[in-house]
Amino acid sequence: MATKLTIDPVSRIEGHLKIEATLDNGIVKEARSSGMLYRGLENILIGRDPRDAARIMQRICGVCPTSQGLAAAFALDEAYGVNGNITNNGRIMRNLIQGANYLQSHILHFYQLAALDYVDVTAVADYAGSDPTLKKVRDFIARGHLGPFVPRYEGDYRLTKEENIHAVRNYVEALNIRRLAHEAVAVFGGKMPHNMAIVAGGVATRATLDKMSRFVGRIEQLISFIDSCYLPDVLMVAERYNDHFGIGKGCGSFMSFGVFDLDSDPDLTKRRRYFPQGIVSLDDLRLRRVDPNLITEEAQYSWYSDSAPRHPYDGKTESDHRKKDAYSWCKSPRYNGEVIEVGPLARMLTAYVSGDKQVQEAVDGVLARFNAPVSALDSVLGRHAARAIEAKIVAAKLRDWVMELKPDQPSFTPFNLEVSSRGMGLHEAPRGALSHWIVVKDGKTSNYQAVVPTTWNAGPMDANGQPGPIEQSLIGTVVRDKNNPFELVRIVRAFDPCLSCAVHVADLGGRNMGPFVVGLE
Ligand code: NFE
Ligand code: MG
C-alpha cells in the first residue's frame, strides 16, 4: 500500500527544505525536494553599479559568503576586462579566503549538522569523568536543555557509549575550531561573514608578514583538529554504519568548475586550478570538459513564470507562486539537459579521474578499508568521506600557499568602469559548482543570475520528467520505520544542502517562533 511521508522542514541543514516521499511497502517510489523560501537577490542588482554584486551577493548566505563574493568577482573581472591580469598576491589571497571558508563549512556540516544522525548525545547523561566540556554537556542535559540535540528520530544509534561520548566532546570542540577558521577568513577578508576584501580586480587587502603569521597559526590548529578528530570521527561513523555506502545513490554524473586558481588565464575553462574542472560519470570514470554554453536553468515545476530552459545570461527571476504543478522555489539547473550532482564528492572524483595522486591515495585508502568499489562513493558515506578528505588536503595547501605571498607586491589591478559587456564567474563553493552571470549596459547591471550548488542538487524535476539529484538519491530507499525515517534525512544531509543560498525570507508579522537556549553555561 502506498504511503506518503512528508518531512517539513528537514532540520539541521541551512534554510527550509521539504521532502515528500511516496512509499510502497516501505520503499521510496517517488520523491520530491522543495525549496520553500523565495530568493530574490538577483533582482536587487538590476540597475546598480556592477561592483555592488561582490558585496550584495554575499548576503545570500552566511555560510558561504566568500564563495558568492568570489563568483561575483570572477564575473566582474571578465566584465571589466581584468580577468587576465589578477596579480599573484590577489590570486593567492582569494584562495586563502576561500580555503579557510571551506574548512569552517565542512567541519560545521559534519559535527553540528550531520553527526547527530549517528551520535547519541544522551550517552553523556551519566558521565562521571573529569573532562570539563563533557561535564557541562551532562549538566546541560540534566537541566532539560536538550536542544539542539532533540527532537530527533529514535531507533538507530549504533556507536558504543565511549564512541558517543568521544564524538560529543569533539562536537563542542568543533565550535571552537570553526571560530578559528572564521578568524582565518577575516585575516585577509576583513571580517566573516560578508567580507570586505573580495573585489573585482583582485583583493582589497595588503599582504603583510603579520597577517601571514596570524593565518598560519590558525591553520596549524585546524590541521591538527582535522587529523586528530574530523577524519577519525568520519571513519568511526563509517565503521558502524558501513551499510550507508549502499544508500543514497544519486544521478551518477558529477561536475566541478574547479577551484583555487594557480594562474590568471582569462578563460575560466582553461585556467589552471588546484582542484580541476570537469564532468565525470561513475559508469565509465571518463573525464569530460565543461562547456559553459550548455548550462541551463528551467522552471517547469518551480514557482517562476518563465518555464523554458534558459542559459543564465538570458535567465529570469519572476516569481509566480500560484503556478500549477510547481512545487519548489529552486529552479532545475541542467548541463546539456543532463541531471548533475555537485559538491565535494564531485570535486574529489574529478581530481581522482584527472590523476591527482594525493586524492587517489586518500580515496583508494578509504575504499580499501571498507572493501568497497569506486561506485560505493555515490552514497551517504561517500559524500561524507569526500568532504573530510578534501578538508585535509585544503588545510595543508593553505599552509603552503600563504608562504607564497610577497608583502611588497600589489594585490589589486585597476580597470575602466565604463563598459557594456558581460561576465561569467565559475568556481566551487564548499557545496559545489557555483556560477554568477552578469550583463552590464552603460556601466550598470542589466541582468544578473546566480546558479548555486544547492539548486543543482535540490532542484525539482524538469520538463522531461527527470527528478533532481537529491530526489533520485531517495528513490529506492528502504524506510524501516516511517515514524523515524532516519534513512531519508541521512541521505539528504549528506548533500549538505543550503536553501538559504537559494532563497530569502523574513517573518514580518513579529510572531514568537519559540524559545531558544544558546550555549552551555
Ligand atoms: Ni548557503 Fe552555498 C555553498 C553556495 S550552497 S552555503 O557552499 O553557493 O548552494
Ligand atoms: Mg538563480
Image (cartoon, rainbow, N blue to C red):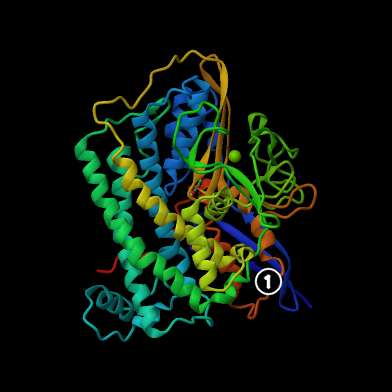
| Residue 447 point in image, percent of width and height | 59, 27
- Which residue type carries mark 1? Thr
Task: Decide which of 366, 104 is in the foreground and name it.
Answer: 366
Q: How many numbered tags mark residues here?
A: 1
Residue at 26% in and 45% down: 215
In the image, 461 versus 213, the foreground residue is: 213
Taking the image as four quarters, which one is ligand 2 found in?
top right
Mark 1 surroundings: few (<14), some (14-19) or many (≥20) residues within 10 A: many
Judge left or right: residue 230 versus residue 426: left
* Helix, strand or loop status at disc 1: loop
Q: Is residue 322 above or below residue 368?
A: above
Q: Is residue 222 visible?
A: yes
Q: Nearer the viewer, residue 465 or 83?
A: 83
Q: In the displayed structure, does residue 285 sit left or right of residue 400?
A: right
| Residue toward you, 52 or 254 | 254
On-image quarter of the N terminus: bottom right
Residue 9 in view here: no
Looking at the image, is 438 positioned above or below residue 100? above
Residue 224 drawn at (x, y percent): 30, 61
| Residue at the disc numbered 1 | 477
* Residue shown at 44% from the left, 28% from the top: 52
Residue 335, percent across and down? Answer: 69, 42
